[in-house]
Image (cartoon, grey):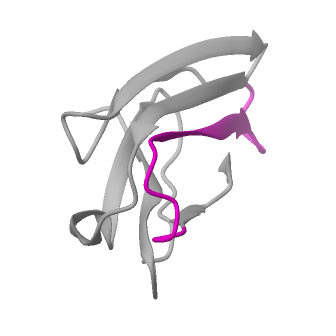
């Protein structure tokens, strides 16, 4: 499987300025994992990906503002191997990291 950390991003409604958060995607039992694309639930959020090492990618999520519209939304990460889904956000403004296999 593909390992995604953290599986969920929680934001404090008390923070009103945009923040940056990170997600690490790496191979678990798969021989290698490549991130093919990342989709944001909000067009204001920008995404950058950096390949850290073989099978590990850091996803930088910029300009994230805690707002109720993000509650339960997902960042869709498309890889070339494996599928893993995160749990839904339970409280506060936040969103999930969700990974899917291309195709």
Give how far across and how far down residue 86 sits, in percent: 51, 67
> Residue 91 vs residue 73: left or right?
right
Give how far across and how far down residue 67 sits, in percent: 30, 64
Highlighted magenta segment, given as a residue range: 12-32
Which residue corresponds to the image point at 52% horizontal and 60% vertical from the top-left? 15
Which residue corresponds to the image point at 72% horizontal and 35% vertical from the top-left? 26
Position of residue 19 relative to residue 1, above or below, is: above
Q: How many marks?
A: 0
Give how far across and how far down residue 42 sits, in percent: 22, 44
- 23 in the magenta segment: yes
Task: Choose top left, top right, bottom left or bottom right for residue 49.
Answer: top right
Which residue corresponds to the image point at 24% horizontal and 48% vertical from the top-left? 41
Viewport quadrant of the C terminus = top left
Which sits in the foreground, 64 or 30?
64
Which residue corresponds to the image point at 75% horizontal and 27% vertical from the top-left? 31
Which sits in the foreground, 56 or 31?
56
Which sits in the foreground, 76 or 32?
76
- 13 in the magenta segment: yes
Residue situated furthest bottom in the rendering: 90
């Amino acid at each position: 499987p593909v390992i995604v950390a953290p599986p969920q991003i929680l934001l404090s409604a008390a923070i009103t300025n945009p923040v940056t958060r990170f997600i690490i995607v790496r191979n678990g039992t798969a021989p290698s994992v490549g991130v093919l694309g990342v989709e944001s639930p909000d067009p204001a959020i920008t995404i950058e990906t950096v390949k850290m090492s073989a099978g590990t990618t850091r996803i930088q999520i910029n300009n994230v503002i805690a707002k109720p519209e993000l509650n339960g939304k997902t960042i869709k990460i498309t890889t070339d191997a494996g599928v893993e889904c995160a749990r839904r956000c339970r409280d506060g403004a936040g969103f999930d990291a969700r990974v899917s296999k291309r195709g």
